[in-house]
Image: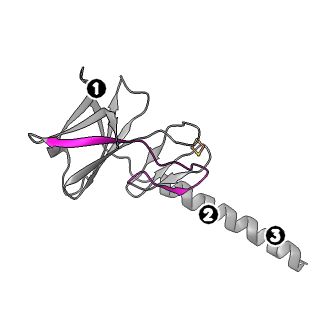
Amino acid sequence: MVNRRDFIKKGCIACMGLTGIATLLEACSAPLQVVKLGNTPDNTLVVPADKFTEQTKMLVLRSDHLDNDILLVKNNASYNALLLMCTHEGYALTPTDSKIFCNAHGSQFDLEGNVIKEPALKPLTRYKTALINNNITVYLNKKV
Ligand code: FES
């Protein structure tokens, strides 16, 4: 026979397991499109604006010259460029279409780089962007 204490203990363990599975599934949504780029001498990344479509609102920018990817998010007429490196202890982050996850210790960030779940306390590094001649330029030496 299960006593009240055992019932509550098992219920709590089951809830924690379900929460962990839900978070894991959320972090495993469809992969985002990766754009491989070279690095220009003036420390910028240039992405054709037509890479964004009605369905594609985010791109992962990857370069051999960068230690971490950059998530480029279209937000109406502007773009957010976020360094996918956790501000807790520097691990690489996993972006999804709704959040950015750190699998090291569980931090989560929104698509503007703000912390929505600790242990990270600082927002993600954001870089200045500009739309020039139908190209999006990410300025790696200009943080916002
Ligand atoms: S390194 Fe990301 S939560 Fe610790």
Q: Is 28 in front, or is 126?
A: 126
Residue at disc 2, secondary structure: helix
Dots 1, 3 in contact, CB < 8 A: no
In this view, 12 is above or below 46 = below
* Residue found at x 43% / y 27%: 67
Q: Which is closer to the viewer, label 2 or label 1?
A: 1
Give the residue pinned by disc 3: 9
Q: Dot 3 surroundings within 10 Å: few (below 14), some, or many (20 or more)?
A: few
Left or right of residue 19: residue 94: left
The amino acid beneath tag 3 is: Lys
Give the residue pinned by disc 2: 19
Q: Position of residue 136 (x, y in %)?
A: 19, 40
Ligand 1: give its quadrant.
top right
Residue at disc 1, secondary structure: loop
Q: Which residues are magenta?
A: 112-131
Q: In whole angstroms, how far apart are the C-alphas of marks 1 and 3?
A: 55 Å
